[in-house]
Amino acid sequence: MDVEKQIELNREIHKEMSDLFFKLKLSYKFTSALMFKETRSPFVRFLFSKPTKERPVPEVVVAADVRPLGLSEGIHKYSILVEGQRYSRVISIDSNNIRGDELNEALLNKVYDQKVAVKAQGLPSA
């Protein structure tokens, strides 16, 4: 595959992934960016946050790197590695029947709460 086609394919994967995550109706706001590393395939980095009217720029964000694993019968499989975690998890999203529980927010909440606690103690955080 030539470089131009690969770039376009990566953009399509990024858009599709971001659209699917938006449909999950997470309690977090997020932004996403297509990332590249020389030794690995491209991935999408999501930054999850909980901005408020009082604090539109969040003090804490949780990063997660998401890689597509495949698509079968409308079900997208992704590997997700949340910051601070040692192992990635596999999530499946059925684009025809999004339930909203495909991504367990408890993991994001745990990392988010840990970062808030570190910040409250005045300690440096990642």
Image: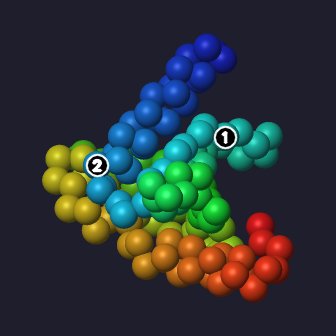
Which is nearer the eye, 74 or 13?
13
The image quadrant that residue 118 belongs to is bottom right
Image quarter in which the N terminus is found: top right
How crowded pointer 1 is (Cα within 10 Å; few <14, some 14-19, many 20+) is rated as: some
The image quadrant that residue 42 belongs to is top right
User: Residue at point 44% right, 33% down?
Assistant: 15
User: Residue at point 66% right, 17% down?
Assistant: 3
**Amino acid type at mark 2:** Lys
User: Residue at point 79% right, 80% down?
Assistant: 122
Asked if 70 appears above or below 101 in the picture, the reply is above
Residue 23 numbered tag:
2
Which is nearer the eye, 3 or 54?
54
Image quarter in which the C terminus is found: bottom right
Q: Secondary structure at mark 1?
A: strand
Image location of residue 83, percent across then percent down? 65, 67
**Amino acid type at mark 1:** Met
Residue 35 numbered tag:
1
Left or right: residue 50 versus residue 124 is left
User: Residue at point 35% right, 47% down?
Assistant: 22
